[in-house]
Image (spheres, coloured by chain):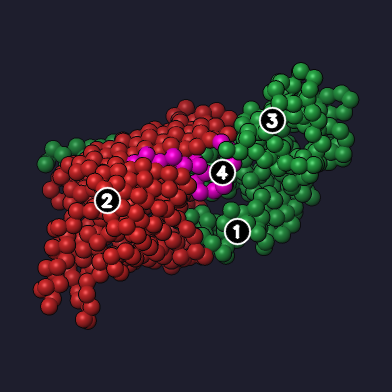
Amino acid sequence: MLFRKICALVALVLISSIHVAQAEPYFAVREGLKCASCHFNPAGGGMRNAFGNAWAQTALPARRIEGTGTDAWTGMLNSFVALGGNLRANATYTDVPNTKASSEFELQEMRAYLAVTAIPDRLAVYIDQRLAPGGSTNLEAFARYTTKDQHWSMQAGQFYLPYGLRLEDDDAFIRQVTGITFATPDQGVQVGYESAQWTAQLAVTNGTASGPETDEGKQASVRAEHVQSIWRVGAGFNYNHTSEGNRQMQGVFAGVRTGPIAWLAEADYLKDETLGPTERKQWVGLIEGNWLISRGQNLKLTAEVFEPDTDVDEDEQNRFSLVWEYVPFQFLQLRVGARLYDGIPQNDLQNRKIYFAQVNGFF
Amino acid sequence: MRKAKLLATCMTCALAGCAGDGKGLDENGRPEGESSGGTLQPTFQSIQANVFTPVCTACHAGAAAPLGLRLDEGASYALLVNAPSVEVPALRRVQPGNPDASYLIQKLEGTAARGGRMPLNQPALPAETIAVIRQWITNGAPNSPGASGGVGGSSKSRFELVTLTAISPARDEAVPAPVRDIVIASNVELDASLLQSNLIQLRASGGDGNFDSGNEVPVPVNVTVRSDLPSVLAITPRLAPLEADSYELRISGGDPVAMADMQARPIDGDDDGTPGGDFVLRFTVEMTR
């Protein structure tokens, strides 16, 4: 029975060809897959599809443990309804210079995903809801229509913007500075294209990060990526026209696998008229190496740089992270890590150190 | 493969060790003299310089600000004080005089009904810092240095001129009908007694987009103060919301009576660097498609 279940899961992984999934971009680089291979969202993040759930049970963990008399979880309740979720709980120790160090346990988030595919492979309604901490907050809610050949899709509603690497870490400079995070979905429409080696999305939204629209200006965000088995390269462009001024950013990102290491890199250049009386130009960059120590164990080393204003000298900031990730068995990830900020000496927060342990349950 | 690893290692090293030494910068990473911080005091300017700018604007700045809440200098006061929360519209982000009912405090203390505690994914603000923000709100959330009854604040105003800024609509902006109010912010507290005078006039162009053709139509307005201390003004059409047309709002900065601050300094309405001159805001209200 056990053998049959595992065979069924492996077969599912091997034969599944629609809506590929991912949990972090380095998984996709390591496997040579597109984000959409494992996730409902073509740019990644959120609900995993059947392939993603199968991969998370077979290829990702150090070992697989069995329940009692239950079938393997695929996320699919039936042909039309799929469920998923994430829970992250942290223990964090924060050391800010000239401030008493603090430590706390924290429920970072509990998110639930629901996809109702009214017409299989063609028409779906999707919801990503943040349930905790605090009250419920909608992050994504959209309807998506996909053409018969599965190449083109169109969605409308509220969704994460397509731009750059969709890292899990919202505090990474390439996420925080660009403002493209899991906390800043926006409302509008998106057209997507998928082929064997290409994935691209174009979104037109209010440009208010899901806040109320206050002007006539809109935001356009584009992401295109070419994927090969061991490398990939992509580019993003975002333009937000507002009554307060315009904001433009463009960037390139890439991934490559060298033996057991999956590398990620992204660089973005921003021009923002809304940060001060004059236009401000900024750079942000990231390089990340993910070393597959053994099955289920990953060591992540990240170096980031942020240039807040190219017209101001000596204001650059760095951020370094070392994170050990362990998936002892399916649907559970343990993370232990340190993040060191390095900025100007007169700003204590820019020189803080954070040490954390995290439990990430997902399904 | 070895070359690739070496290259990646070199790139990582290239990124490392290049943090700025901060020479010539203030604590917010801006050139000295551009902004002033100092010890945190229960004044808006001090909180802006010590909390909003260095901490909150990592995310809440510019066009990408979450939920449209910009906390960068120049926008934060108008978007905080007496402005309804997006997450819980029944609450104001800052309700002057009532910190417990202010959504800003609830978000900082982690007691808000929705969403995570702010700053998101960062260490919570020290209790002493939140206490200062509470005190500022208790004092009426004024937007002027040292206007909190002598509690804290700089003894010297950093504003040499009284300037007005169009918050909504922006200058020359085209906005969809109907427009229910026009929001103007001042960099200092204005003399509220002058609001009863006929200093603020709103005219519709009469359909031709021109304000010199003689067919302009005066639009009667009410002026209300959005903050307990008058630095944010809401100008509301008295009869009905503004429909499609071009409009001109004019706030007098000269004879016979000029809008002025509490020190009787007239506004620099024409933005020429000297006191005086009318503040003129033109915008267009478009048909709703």
- Residue at x-position 29% and y-position 58%: A120
Whether callout 2 and callout 1 share a subunit is answered no
User: With A268 as the anchor, is A58 left or right in this view?
Assistant: left
- Distance from label 2 to label 4 (Cα)? 30 Å
Tell me the SS state at disc 4. Answer: loop
Q: Determine the chain carrying the residue at label 2.
A: A
Frontmost of labels 2 and 3 is: 3
Frontmost of labels 2 and 1 is: 2
- Distance from label 2 to label 3 (Cα)? 48 Å
Residue annotated with mark 3: B245
Q: Earlier in the sequence, mark 2 or mark 4?
A: 2
Res B229 seen here: yes
Residue B88 circle label: 1
Res A59 seen here: no
- Distance from label 1 to label 3 (Cα)? 34 Å
Frontmost of labels 1 and 3 is: 3
- Distance from label 4 to label 3 (Cα)? 21 Å
Whether residue A27 is in magenta: the answer is: no
Tell me the SS state at disc 1. Answer: loop
Whether callout 4 and callout 3 share a subunit is answered no
Q: Earlier in the sequence, mark 1 or mark 3?
A: 1
Q: Determine the chain carrying the residue at label 4.
A: A
Whether residue A213 is in magenta: the answer is: yes
Question: In the rendered picture, chain B carries what hue?
Answer: green
Which chain is assigned red? Answer: A
Tell me the SS state at disc 2. Answer: helix
